Image: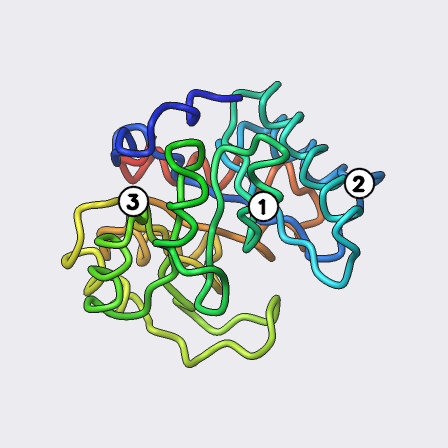
Amino acid sequence: MSDAAAPASAVTAAGFPRLHVLTPSDQGPDDLRLVDAALAAGAPAIQVRVKDATDRVHLEVVRAVVARCRAAGAWSIVNDRVDLALVAGADAVHLGAHDLPVADARALAGDRLRIGGTARDPAQARALVAAGADYLGVGPTFATRTKDGLPDPLGVAGVAAVVEAVEVPVVAIAGITLERLAEVLASGADGVAVVGAVTQASDPGQATRDLLDALRRHGRP
């Protein structure tokens, strides 16, 4: 496991991965070329999303990604499923509004997992941190086609409001591209989570490198 295995209270902006690359939701355990390309390019965190699969297949994907992240020294983050994150030895779990509440996830995981919560406003952000969230994902920042049923975009002003409300790292997500990166980082966000900017690129590895270079130029090592 990467150094994310330290106690959850150790999460700070200084050691937090600035780029989270999310896998396509239909990613299978036998085709992880995109994950390999992103990690080879230096991605510091991979977030695993799996939809419409059995728990057994889901776990196979998670274990395969965890192993790759461990070898690369990157964070492995599991979407939604605390149980699978724990079984696979992942570094973190990211929970949405309809997933297990953060407080219950913390009771199950203790300090074995970093826990990310999803916030849309300052009050919700503060409540999630009080419940035990180590970092927050905020969005959708912009409109996106990679996930259906999302609420209206918050824009960078909405991200900035959450950043100002909490002291844990904040990651902006949804609709974030290389061209929009500077605008998003100006909100104060500690990092970004991307899907289409990498998964839909003709060269996912180069797209990852371009995002990392842009993050460094804007003071996000």
Residue type at the position of mark 1: Asp
Mark before the other along the chain sequence, 1 or 2: 2
Q: Which residue is mark 3?
A: 190
Bin the neighbour count of mark 2 within 10 Å (Cα to Cα): few under 14, some 14-19, many 20 and up. Answer: some
Which image quarter is the C terminus in? top left
Q: Which percent across, then down, holds residue 212?
A: 45, 36
Secondary element at image label 3: loop
> What whole-number distance in Å separates the C-alpha atoms at marks 1 and 2?
18 Å
Q: Return the mark for residue 29.
A: 2
Residue at point 68%, 33% (across, down): 37
Secondary element at image label 1: helix
Q: Which percent across, then down, holds residue 198?
A: 61, 48
Secondary element at image label 2: loop
Q: Which percent across, then down, holds residue 169?
A: 28, 44
Residue at point 60%, 69% (across, down): 147
Residue situated in front as seen by the camera: 212 or 21: 21
Mark before the other along the chain sequence, 1 or 3: 1
Q: Quadrant of residue 102?
A: bottom left
Residue 191 sits above or below residue 75 on the image: below
Bin the neighbour count of mark 3 within 10 Å (Cα to Cα): few under 14, some 14-19, many 20 and up. Answer: many
Q: Quadrant of residue 11?
A: top left
